[in-house]
Image: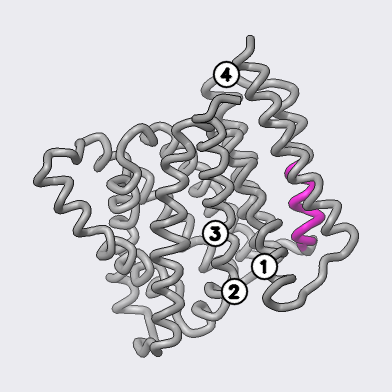
């Protein structure tokens, strides 16, 4: 495997680790804030922290139109995914939300197969392994609710985010990340009209800052860099490691344990990622 591919793989695994660390913080924040306020406040903090770099890049002539356009396109998908996931989770279980959100991998693979007309048996096998592992790890309930439907639409948005970022990943990842946060600021308007709780405690604000800077900026810069070297269908499989790392964090921080089926599920997700990597290597050799 080429060093650039290794860097891309490690960057995407790093992205997944940071996303996984967000679950405890999001759970606490969403018990206080509504989905509108959470979406725009997190995005505002993330964007403001990157503003000095953007100003510097602009005056140095390093900010391309394509990077700005790509960031905005990716940002629309990101904002919709974040909002729909938060909204839908209120009306369904956390396990259902985790499983359905992870189904973005199916939409990415469908796009690659039906639109780009490139697919392989190994990729199909990796998809089956990964989705089966996700099901065992998240243990979703069979009952379907309006929340499940909202999260499913959000999963389509997350799939679009992965595919769009793959297209624009050759540009400056920090510039892309900044403009990725901009569309979510539009949620300020509905927040003004529909939000009932306008008070944000210092503890909640600090958690939102962590989500914005670490799980937002840090993770998305790594994602933009990593997807330069890793195809979107493989990247989407790597991102399914998120619940695996989330379970590991829960074990370390909260002393939660995994059942045998959940351990098997984590193993299937890892097997799916390895199978996808083998598929990618074979395509390069051929």
Tell me how far mark 1 sits from mark 2, CA to CA.
Answer: 9 Å
Q: Nearer the viewer, mark 1 or mark 3?
A: 1
Which mark is first along the chain, 3 or 4?
A: 3
**Residue 68 appears left or right of 228:** left
Frontmost residue, 203 versus 193: 203
The label number, if any, that marks residue 24 in the structure image = 2
Secondary structure under the numbered disc 4 in the rendered image: loop
**Residue 241 appears left or right of 175:** right
Give the crowd class for mark 3: few <14, some 14-19, many >=20 residues within 10 Å. Answer: many
Q: Residue at x 27, y 58 (%)?
A: 50
**Quarter occupied by the N terminus:** top right
Residue 159 image offset from top left, x and y in percent: 53, 43
Secondary structure under the numbered disc 3 in the rendered image: helix
Which mark is first along the chain, 3 or 1?
A: 3
Tell me how far mark 4 sits from mark 3, CA to CA.
Answer: 30 Å
Let me know if residue 131 is in the magenta part: yes
Secondary structure under the numbered disc 1 in the rendered image: helix
**Residue on which disc 3 sits:** 19
């Amino acid at each position: 495997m080429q060093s650039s591919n290794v860097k891309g793989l490690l960057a995407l695994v790093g992205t997944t680790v940071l996303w996984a660390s967000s679950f405890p913080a999001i759970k606490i924040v969403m018990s206080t804030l509504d989905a509108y306020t959470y979406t725009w406040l997190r995005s505002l903090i993330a964007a403001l922290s990157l503003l000095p770099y953007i100003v510097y890049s602009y005056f140095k002539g390093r900010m391309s139109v394509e990077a700005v356009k790509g960031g905005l396109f990716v940002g629309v998908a990101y904002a919709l995914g974040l909002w729909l996931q938060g909204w839908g989770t209120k009306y369904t279980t956390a396990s259902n939300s985790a499983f359905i959100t992870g189904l973005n991998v199916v939409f990415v693979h469908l796009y690659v197969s039906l639109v780009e007309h490139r697919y392989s048996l190994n990729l199909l096998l990796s998809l089956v392994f990964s989705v089966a592992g996700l099901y065992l790890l998240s243990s979703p309930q069979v009952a379907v609710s309006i929340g499940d439907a909202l999260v499913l639409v959000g999963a389509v948005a997350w799939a679009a985010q992965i595919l769009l970022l793959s297209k624009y990943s050759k540009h400056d990842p920090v510039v892309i990340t900044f403009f990725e946060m901009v569309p979510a600021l539009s949620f300020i308007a509905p927040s003004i009209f529909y939000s009932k709780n306008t008070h944000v405690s210092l503890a909640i604000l600090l958690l939102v800052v962590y989500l914005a800077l670490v799980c937002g900026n840090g993770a998305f810069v790594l994602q933009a860099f990593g997807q330069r070297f890793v195809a979107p269908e493989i990247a989407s499989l790597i991102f399914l490691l998120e619940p695996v790392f989330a379970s590991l964090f829960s074990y370390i921080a909260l002393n939660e344990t995994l059942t045998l089926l959940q351990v098997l599920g984590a193993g299937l997700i890892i097997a799916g990622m390895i199978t996808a990597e083998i598929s990618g290597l074979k395509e390069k050799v051929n």
